[in-house]
Image (cartoon, helix red, strand yellow):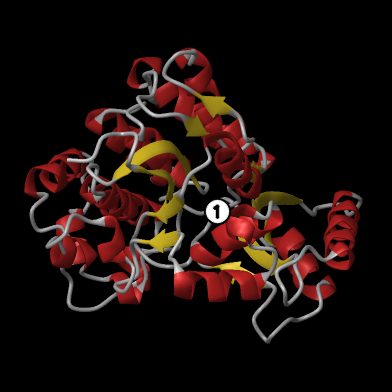
Amino acid sequence: MNTSATKERVLVIAPGRGCYNKEELGYLKRLHGDKVDFIAGIDAFRRHEGQKSIAELDAMDKYSFKLHTPGENASALIYACAMADFMDIDRDRFEIVAVTGNSMGWYIALACAGALDEEGAIGVINTMGSMMQDGLIGGQMIYPEMDDNWHPSPVRTQMLDKLLAEAEATEGCALYTSIHLGGFRVLAGNEAGLKLAEERLPKIDERYPMRLYNHGAFHSPLLTEVSAKGKSLLPKSFFKAPNVPLVDGRGAIWTQYSTDTEKLWEYTLGHQVTEPYDFTRAVQVAVKEFAPDRVMILGPGTTLGGAVAQSLIGCHWFGWQQKKDFSEGQKVDTRLIAMGMDAQRPLALKPGSQ
């Protein structure tokens, strides 16, 4: 067994909503058949809430937008897949020096770091994920804020900021920055605000601006009531000091030595719900403060890899200064390991594991 002095230092990143898609159907069944007790614990909670089991959802013959994308199902599914991946990381080779996550991935990061135990994690994730089961509050849309080399585009940034100012001055419009996501900006708003964005933003690659299906207006003032409800339902006693440092959506660090659990509860159910989530900053602070040798993104899916690479390019981590550096560097030495990719997954696991 390696000593910690010879282990590779790893930053672990948990994904958010939108990463369990048609290609990920069967992820738990295929890769985590050994996590029977863990999955059963989640499903016992969900049965009590009158919800469909994640084991059943994951084992379905066909992927269903109606069943797999609503928050009350997607959140628990993604948590189960990501946490199960986290359990499989080879601790003999890797020392996990910090954990962060994107959006809902913050809740998963809390679980990975031990700030939420299994009961607390499914309680927080399932409760917050089910807040809009009676109807979505607003929506989200994503738009590139970078050029083809994955460098920031001041022109696009200025255009997005101008759009937000116009929305603020337009009666009936609500539109906010929701997430800084590497080279992308995620916007949150009501229908009028999102329609204004679709009218004003030039089309790119016949893809953007792109609405995010079944996503509410996360990380915006439109979720003030969701924040209040979350605080009323989820006790402060769920939250503990982490075993591993956590980096949140402001770039603030929570350690095992200095965490005030009441403030962690307040941030998680307050600021994190109603204010912008700066994932780019979280990644950049994490690598600068904890100097990992590699970065691992938990599965399911591969949708977060580009945003993480763009964030790393933004601070020249691993010597990457543009998209080409990342693409070519990965062929020589896979510094960014996506556990949701079949080709990269074995790099994180003990030899002989799935």
Up/down of 149 relative to 265, above or below = below
- Toward the viewer: 290 or 176? 290
Q: Total of numbered circles in the picture?
A: 1
Residue drawn at the location 17% of the way across and 63% of the way down: 31
Q: Position of residue 112 (x, y in %)?
A: 33, 37
Write down the quadrant of residue 272 in the picture.
Answer: top right
Q: Residue drawn at (15%, 57%), measured in percent from left and top?
A: 32
Residue 238 seen from this side = yes
- The answer to whether any part of residue 15 appears in the image is no
**Above/below status of 254 relative to 166:** above
Amino acid type shown at disc 1: Gly
Residue 209 percent location from the top left of the image: 69, 73
* Left or right: residue 79 compared with residue 175: left
> If the image is split into quadrants, where does the N terminus sit?
top left
Nearer-the-camera pick, 61 or 173: 61
- Which secondary structure, mark 1? loop
* Mark 1 Cα shell of 10 Å, populated few (<14), some (14-19), many (≥20): many
The residue under the point 61% across, 43% down is 219
Q: Position of residue 103 (x, y in %)?
A: 52, 47
Check disc 1 and report the residue beneath it: 216
Q: What residue is shown at x 43% (from left), y 65% (from top)?
A: 334
The picture places residue 41, in percent across and down from the top left corner, at 14, 40
For the C terminus, the image quarter is bottom left
- Residue 245 vs 165, above or below: the answer is above
| Residue 261 relative to residue 45: left or right | right
Horizontal arrangement in the rendering, residue 85 relative to residue 237 (left or right): left
